[in-house]
């Protein structure tokens, strides 16, 4: 969100929500002329990809340049493809597990890699490994001469002491569970290609992007609204407004290097699940119930380095909590894709 653009008090509908999620920051508008066309976004059909692609396109239009933005995905949901096309984003349907399919894609000097899967790992771990390791290997082979921003996750870290403020980029990577290990595999294969081919890469380790249709704040708000107990087993977390996250991903392109560098990015604060639930209780006028208890360790990342390089996410979490409470109270559309933030054993 631009510092000179006022945040709304509430968000009335999906049209306003998508407008907000795709509104580029002034920093992005200033940066986008440095991106040589086309900008290729791999895995653009997921929760973050469509609004990221449109944000890039809007930034280019605002900057007065004609940046070709190419969104690549299987597009199993045809409505996402239509939504992008209506907003002047080119779409190409490709299964990124098919190495030959990538030959259909345009050459590019700038690539954003959003490919990954998390949920369903315990039922089909081989698919999780294929999407998280084979797909990026194919992508880095195809775009060996590009600079690449590759989305990763804070799940590559172990649980860390809450008092520490979260894992930092130099901490040992000791993921918990199969998904976390597959995510580490993704990083390692990307690092391999970066070293072998000199491909500049920045690995963006994200903790919990949220909008109003999904995310950790939505999960907590729904529990409170339904009168269900909120699990305190994972008693602390980080999160970031999805619009801010997408803006930072695009602006991270100049930070790519070979060997690949890693950056944590999320909100700056360690947030208490108990306190968030109590805020929702007040906003929704609902009593709050809890189950479990807080532990001394949680899945947390310290985003100090990315904040120094890209700036602090400008959308305050208190604002997102207010938006989320109103959205849930009014029955706004939800994706029904829970984050399972309370999981401590890495089984998703």
Image: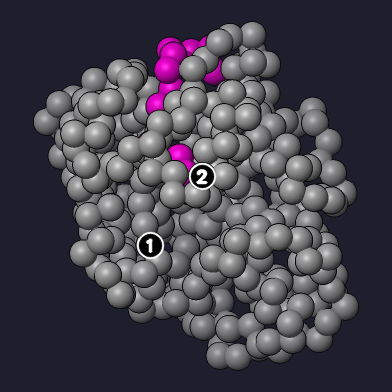
Residue at the location (63% across, 49% down)?
241
Crowd class of label 1 (few under 14; some 14 to 19; many from 20; radius 10 Å): many
- In the rendering, which numbered label is found on residue 118? 1
**Cα distance in 3D space between marks 2 and 1:** 22 Å
- In the rendering, which numbered label is found on residue 78? 2
The magenta span reads 31-46
- In the displayed structure, does residue 291 sit left or right of residue 75? right
Percent coordinates x, y for residue 61 in the rendering? 64, 15
The quadrant of the rendering that contains the C terminus is: bottom left
View extreme (left): residue: 196
Q: Is residue 39 magenta?
A: yes
Percent coordinates x, y for residue 258 in the rendering? 24, 29
- Decide which of tag 2 and tag 1 comes sooner along the chain: 2
Helix, strand or loop status at disc 1? loop
- In the rendering, which numbered label is found on residue 192? none
Image vertical order of residue 11 relative to residue 198, above or below: below
Image vertical order of residue 26 relative to residue 317, above or below: above
Regarding residue 336, the answer to whether it shows in the image is yes
Residue at the location (68% across, 16% down)?
62
Quadrant for residue 159, please give it. bottom left
Residue at the location (64% across, 83% down)?
230
Quadrant for residue 21, please give it. top right
């Amino acid at each position: 969100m631009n510092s000179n653009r006022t945040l709304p008090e509430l968000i009335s509908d999906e049209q306003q929500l998508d407008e907000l999620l795709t509104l580029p920051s002034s920093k992005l508008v200033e940066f986008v002329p440095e991106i040589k066309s086309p900008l290729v976004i791999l895995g653009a059909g997921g929760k973050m990809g469509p609004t990221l692609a449109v944000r890039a396109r809007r930034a280019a239009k605002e900057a007065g340049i004609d940046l070709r933005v190419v969104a690549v995905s299987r597009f199993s949901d045809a409505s996402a493809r239509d939504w992008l096309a209506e907003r002047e984003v080119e779409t190409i349907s490709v299964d990124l597990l098919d190495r030959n399919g990538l030959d259909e894609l345009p050459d590019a000097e700038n690539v954003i890699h959003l490919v990954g899967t998390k949920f369903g790992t315990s039922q089909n771990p081989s698919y999780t490994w294929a999407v998280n390791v084979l797909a990026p290997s194919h992508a880095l082979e195809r775009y060996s001469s590009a600079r690449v921003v590759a989305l990763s996750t804070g799940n590559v870290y172990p649980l860390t002491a809450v008092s520490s403020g979260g894992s930092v980029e130099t901490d040992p990577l000791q993921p918990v569970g199969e998904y976390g290990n597959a995510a580490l595999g993704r990083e390692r294969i990307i690092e391999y290609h970066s070293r072998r081919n000199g491909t500049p890469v920045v690995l963006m380790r994200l903790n919990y992007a949220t909008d109003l249709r999904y995310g950790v704040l939505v999960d907590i708000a729904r529990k409170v609204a339904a009168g269900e107990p909120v699990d305190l087993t994972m008693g602390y977390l980080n999160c970031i407004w999805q619009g801010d996250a997408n803006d930072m991903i695009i602006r991270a392109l100049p930070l790519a290097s070979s060997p690949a560098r890693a950056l944590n990015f999320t909100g700056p604060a360690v947030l208490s699940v108990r306190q968030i639930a109590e805020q929702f209780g007040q906003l929704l006028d609902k009593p709050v119930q809890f189950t479990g208890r807080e532990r001394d360790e949680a899945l947390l990342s310290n985003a100090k380095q990315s904040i120094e390089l890209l700036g602090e996410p400008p959308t305050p979490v208190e604002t997102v909590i207010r938006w989320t409470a109103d959205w849930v109270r009014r029955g706004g559309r939800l994706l029904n894709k829970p984050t399972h933030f309370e999981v401590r054993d890495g089984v998703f």
